[in-house]
Structures are given as structure tokens and as C-alpha cells.
Image: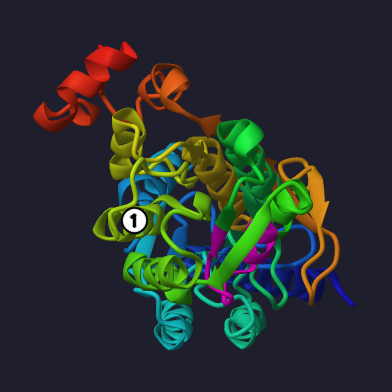
Amino acid sequence: MNTRMRRAAVAVAATAMAVSLAACGSAKEAGEKPKDSTGTATAGEAIKVGLLLPENQTARYEKFDKPLIEKQVKELTGGKGEVVYANAKQSATTQNSQVDTMITNKVDVLILDAVDSKAIASAVKKAKDAGIPVVAYDRLAEGPIDAYTSFDNEEVGKVQGKALLTALGDKAKAGDIVMMNGSVTDPNAALFKKGAHAELDGKVNIGKEYDTVEWKPENANTNMAAAISALGKDKIVGVYSANDGMAGGIITALKAAGVTPLPPVTGQDAELAGVQRIVAGEQYMSVYKPYAPEAEAAAKMAVALAKGEKVDAIGTSKVDSPTTKGVPSVLVPVVSLTKDNIKDTVVKDGVYTVAEICTDKYAAACESAGIK
């Protein structure tokens, strides 16, 4: 090849390279996601996080989880990340459709609190097949999830059981207790029940036990009325309630039946109404679960997964679901909440102000409890 031909070839090659580089630049400008070292598309800072929460019967989801996760995603992405939210309102069918919508909207990652851990498995697989990683939040969803954050749910049941035994003291076997467990569609409910039984079995007489459909307070109320009718109102010495909403329904049933004094009733979630009942002496305890660290862990794992990063440094524990082994997880410890530590827990952590708890109805009880 002569000198002129070589120069022409070099010129053609240089032009082709320039066109190629320009094309790459155009693709990036058009919104093509950058690739990580494995070739998987990543989202950069402008990520879209799909957040699917299970219901709005329990106050925590709208009041705490949603705003906390939104705040964390914004902080972790320099304000560029977006949270797309949907609530299933206790319908597994609706939640499956919501996953489909999130896939259509091309979210980069899903944070999923399942209504029904088994029923959601096929939707989780659809998301995975679409290249969307899934963080199971609060409840261990089945299917190919990538990460999980919750509380030590068996420990929650143990904390509740221990508190009930403390409240009963030497009256533990003086009558019957009623166990009001959560919904069978919620895997956490089974863990709460297991933990509670580990503490209570052999130490109390369990007169009646119920799995409460959809965790609804009205269903707990109906079950409690049936238990009172079957056992006799003077025979019930304590009630294990898996959460605060149901505790409200239970206490209403006890009052309607003329049960006095009220037996100790447990709870969970430190809902405002539950905290107020504790102040008033109607509910013995709740389980305070610090939502901020749970939400922070979920947001951190979601943002990392959206960027194509591993989450093992965040989820240092490993949890097995019925379908997926060794899921990187963060398990947050819980606190037994009684009248004695309201100021040092939910007030100190900014969950509620004294003014929110100590309304006119509860002012005298707050004064008596030293909550000022």
C-alpha cells in the first residue's frame, strides 16, 4: 500500500471512530443507562424507586414508613431519586396488579411489603425477569427477592409474651388467656405467634386462640366477644394481642361485656391510640419498632441495587425464605413499650410529641404517669 492509500485508510478509520463515539454520546444523552462491570444497566442518581405498601388499616405505613423511605431516597441520591408509591389496601390481587404497573413504568427497583407473601411470588418473578431487583420490606415475600429488611419478628412475639407474664405475675394460671394472632397471609404473624408461644406455653392456660382475618380490629372484636361468651368474662386473666389495632377491638369487646378491671392486653406498633390506651391503663404494653432504621436500610439497599451494586455490606445478616436462600438482610431490634418508658422511646425519638399523646382526654393520666 502506497503512502497516499495509507493516509486515506487512516482518515476513514478516524472518521468511523468519531462517528462511533458520537453515537455513544447520543445514546447516553438519550437516557441510556450506564452499565456496571458485569454489563448490567444501572440508573445513576436519577433512580425511580417503586414503593408498594400492604394496607392503610395500620397507621404506621402512611405516617412513618412512606415519608421515611421517601426522605432517605432523596438524601441518598442528592435529591434526584423519585419514589413512586402505591398502597394495596389489604388486597393481594391489587398488589399483584400494582407490580405490573411498576414494571410498565420502568422503575429501577421495588421496595415491597407484601399483603400475601405467597401470592406475590409470581409478581416478584415478573419484576426480576424485567431486570427490576426487589427489596422485601417488613414482610418476607416469596419469589426471587434480592434483599430484606424487617424486625426480628420471632423476638417481637417473645417480647409480648414476656410482658404478659410480667403483668400477670402469680395470676398466670388463675384463669384463661386469649391469644389473638394476626392474619395467616402475613408471614410475620406466624413468627409473632411462634415467639409468643415459646414464652407462654406451659406457663398459662390458653383458653381460646384465633388467627385474625386481615388483622382487622373489627374481626378481633368479634373473636373476643366469642371468647368471652365461651370462657366467661370472669375467667379471662389476660389477652395476647399481636398488634395495637386489634388490641383496640379487643378492649372494646371487653368493655361491652362489662369486664372489670380490664385484664392486661398486649400490642405492637406503638400506634398513637395504643400509646394513649397504655397511658390510661387500658392496654398493658405495645412493641415499639423504630421505623427509621428499617426505612433507612430499605432505602440504602434499594438505591444500591438500582445502581447495580451489591448489598452484602448493608445486609450483613442472611435470611432464608421458602423460595430463596441466603437473602442479605437487616433485622432491627425492638423495645417493649409500657407506661414507664413512653418518654424514653416514642417521645424521645420524635415519633409523637407529649401534646399529641396527652390530649384533654388523657391529660390527667399523663400527669399521673409523669409524662409532661
| Res 364 visible | yes
Question: Does residue 66 appear left or right of residue 162 in this picture?
Answer: left
Question: In the rendered image, which quarter contains the C terminus?
Answer: top left
| Res 309 visible | no
Nearer to me, 238 or 329: 238
What segment carries the magenta color? 178-193
The quarter of the displayed image where residue 181 is located: bottom right
Question: Does residue 24 appear left or right of residue 78 in this picture?
Answer: right
Q: How many numbered marks are there?
A: 1
- Residue 188, percent from left and from top: 62, 61
Nearer to me, 156 or 211: 211
- Residue 124, percent from left and from top: 61, 79
In the displayed structure, would residue 95 be above or below residue 333? Answer: below
Residue pointed to by mark 1: 254
Q: Residues within 10 Å of mark 1 (few under 14, many from 20)?
A: many
Nearer to me, 269 or 117: 269
Q: Amino acid at mark 1?
A: Leu
